[in-house]
Image (cartoon, rainbow, N blue to C red):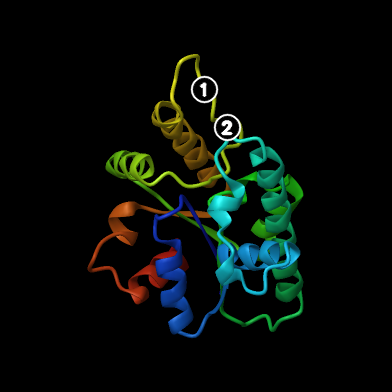
Amino acid sequence: MILTLCGMSGVGKSYWSKKLESAGFIRFGCDDLITTRIAFELGFASSAQFDMHQWVGYPDEAAHKERADRYLQAEENVVKGIFDYLLNTQKDQNIVIDSTGSVIYMPESILKRLRQLTKIVYLDITQQDHEKMLRYYLSHPVAIIWNGFFQPQPGESRLQTFARCYPLLIKSREEKYRELAHLTIPAKIHKASETTLEDLLEFVSTH
């Protein structure tokens, strides 16, 4: 079984992919792989010394566009590397790809290949999750790929623009995740405390 988990940051992709890893799946954590790649390119001895969020910065900062583009290029290279592994591994190998929130911004050729080589599973969110994510982001704003959704209005502070534009970004991403995925797992299943790894795998296998 070869799975790709997709969805918003914080939705549970890493939680479930690490559960799968503990059950014997080979795990590719794309966030960590991208961080390691860029840190190496920038000359850091270790990715632990590199703060990705600080480096990418906020969308109203001068270096953001160039660095966001470089991040996406690194993500594309990481995903291509995973493709090479998939094409050269045993067909019965269990593998899980913990994708980034920005995987949907990869070129169409990459997304098509991802759908061909893996079963893409979207971890859905509720309206309550929307509200919780917005509250959390406003209190802990970090660098993300805005894909054009950060649009300041005259007189707005950065935080006010975040408050207005972040919900639009979430909604847009949701639509793209659903279009990309072979399967959507409702939040009431993947977020339920009683859902076991066996429950999740059974849902994925039977849907």
Percent coordinates x, y for residue 106 in the rendering: 68, 48
Tell me the quarter of the image containing the N terminus.
Answer: bottom right
Count up the numbered dots: 2
Depth check, front residue: 123 or 148 = 148
Tell me the quarter of the image containing the C terminus.
Answer: bottom left
Percent coordinates x, y for residue 154 in the rendering: 50, 14
Q: Which mark is residue 60?
A: 2
Percent coordinates x, y for residue 13 in the rendering: 45, 62
Mark 1 near mark 2, Cβ–Cβ under 8 Å? yes
**Rendered view: 196 above or below 167:** below
Depth check, front residue: 65 or 112 = 65
View extreme (top): residue: 154
- Mark 1 and mark 2 lie on one chain; the one further toward the N terminus is 2
Identify the element where label 2 is drawn.
loop
Percent coordinates x, y for residue 163 in the rendering: 39, 30
Kind of residue at disc 2: Asp
Neighbor class of circle 2 (other Cα within 10 Å; few <14, some 14-19, many 20+) is: few
Depth check, front residue: 39 or 184 = 39
Measuring 54% from the left and 52% from the top, which residue is drawn there?
53
**Rendered view: 156 above or below 2:** above
Quadrant in the rendering for residue 149: top right
* Whether residue 101 is visible: yes
Measuring 59% from the left and 63% from the top, which residue is drawn there?
50
Measuring 76% from the left and 71% from the top, which residue is drawn there?
84
Q: Which mark is residue 152?
A: 1
Q: CA distance from mark 1 to mark 2?
A: 9 Å
